[in-house]
Image: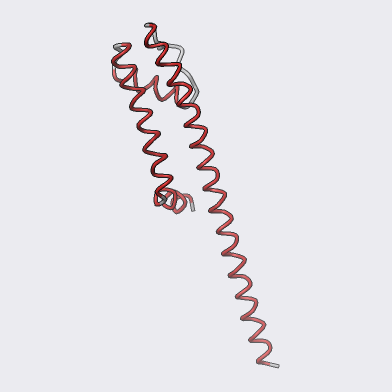
Amino acid sequence: MIVATFRSFLNKKHYRHLIYTTFIVLLIGVLGFRFLEKWRWIDCINYAVSTMVTTGNASVQPVTDLGKIFNIFYMFISVVLILFFVNTIQRHFQDQRQSFQVKHLRHKKLAQKHVDESLNREI
């Protein structure tokens, strides 16, 4: 069910745009830290991801004023984007679950109707 839900998530244009936007913001963070702070690529990726998912990273921090200002804006944008992303995923799973329940109930009603018709024919 998880794979089917993931596929249906990727098939919707709105959700694909959200994924693209998330990766673009991540890329902006990596490039910003790389060129403003002159960090190694792995440190840029690590810091950008840990900032985006709000876990933080105390071992690496911006030291230049421009890097700190960039980090402030990056944190705000990242947190809002990730919260929106998590909310969208939760809503998608909830919609999928409700859709499955409706289909199951419809199937159950059709099966019961078929059984009732069979019983009426036998009488």
Report the residue that reaches farthest toward the right. 123
Which quadrant is home to the C terminus?
Answer: bottom right
Report the residue that reaches farthest toward the top. 64
* Residue at figure coordinates x 33%, y 27% from the top left: 27
Quick check: 68 above or below 88? above
Q: How many numbered tags mark residues here?
A: 0
Image spot of residue 59 (x, y percent): 42, 11
Quick check: 41 above or below 17? above
* Residue at figure coordinates x 45%, y 16% from the top left: 72
The answer to whether residue 102 is left or right of residue 119 is left
Front residue of this view, candidates 58 and 32: 32
* Residue at figure coordinates x 50%, y 24% from the top left: 54
Coloration mode: secondary structure
Front residue of this view, candidates 9 and 12: 12
Image spot of residue 4 (x, y percent): 45, 54
The answer to whether residue 75 is left or right of residue 104 is left
Image spot of residue 26 (x, y percent): 37, 28
Image spot of residue 19 (x, y percent): 40, 39
Q: Quadrant of residue 99?
A: bottom right
